[in-house]
Amino acid sequence: MILAALALMGLARTAAAQQSYVFASPNTRASLTDEDARVSLTSFEELNAIAIADRIACSMRRKVEITGMLGIYASSAENSFLVAADLKHDEAEYAGSLLARYEHQKYVLLFFPQRAGRDHLWVIRTPKSFDAAVAAAREMRLTPVSLRPEARGNEIWIVDIGDKFGDQPKRFAEQVGGSATLQTGAAEILGDENDRAKSMEIFDRRIAAFESRTGRELRSRLWSEAWHDASARTCSAELPE
């Protein structure tokens, strides 16, 4: 499943005007427990997904940051990851489509920072434990959220499409004794959230159109032995805390 894409404001990092964020997951198993998802963050599945994301983004930009995260749902979880790079809009769509196609996902969600954007992206940093933070998010019905485990707590990212949560994320931050930052922008869902076969067709068309227009040919590498067995990065760095 694909969870979210996020721009950060403050927290020792500032989004570039052209920065794009793609949040993806390699997981296709249904209803993982929280613990199973946490264990999966160290799996080859996760390492390979990050390695493929690295190769896709690094083929277009040299400053790329990728970090593993957890997707938290109402009663389940999954291992996932975030790609942050100064990709143009169509490049981010291309990268997201390639990732979703490779991982056999139904959809991918992108986020592009915009001052007058109608979608909201919240980042909450809390010293609470993983279990406490997840329980609070579920209790307030904010899921799905993305959680990044950190050395001194956890960072919870909430993508609020259409501002349906209002100031609930801010109240959530207060409940978990954390701080909240808000970024406006535009979220974009690619694919079909209910039909995997339709999603594959959508991604194939988008990939083919971009490659025909630009001359790029990354699709042919997706299932190559070199990419299928990859587990190390090339140019990307870990997203700093």
Image (cartoon, rainbow, N blue to C red):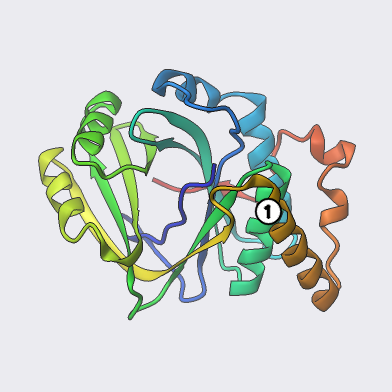
Question: In the rendered view, does 148 fall on the left or right side of 84?
Answer: left
Residue 101 point in image, percent of width and height? 71, 49
Quarter residue 141 falls in: top left
Q: Nearer the viewer, residue 178 or 167?
A: 167
Q: Quadrant of residue 57?
A: bottom right
Residue 75 picture location, percent across and down: 35, 28
- Is residue 85 shown above or below 4? below
Q: Nearer the viewer, residue 29 or 153?
A: 29
- How many labels sit on residues? 1
The residue lying at 78 percent from left, 72 percent from top is: 209
Residue depicted at 77% across the width and 35% down the height: 230
The C terminus, quarter of image: top left
| Near-viewer residue (90 or 203) | 203
Q: Is residue 210 left or right of residue 11?
A: right
| Residue 49 shows in this picture | yes
Percent position (x, y) of residue 69? 46, 38
On the image, the x and y values in percent for residue 35 come to 42, 18
Q: Which residue is mark 1?
A: 198
Q: Is residue 99 visible?
A: no
Drawn side of residue 167 relative to residue 36, left or right: left
Q: In the displayed structure, does residue 208 sit left or right of residue 80?
A: right
Q: Which residue is found at the position 61% from the left and 48% from the top? A: 195
Q: Quadrant of residue 97?
A: bottom right
What kind of residue is marked 1?
Answer: Lys
Quarter holding the N terminus?
top right
Residue projecting furthest to the bottom: 116
* Residue at figure coordinates x 71%, y 65% from the top left: 60
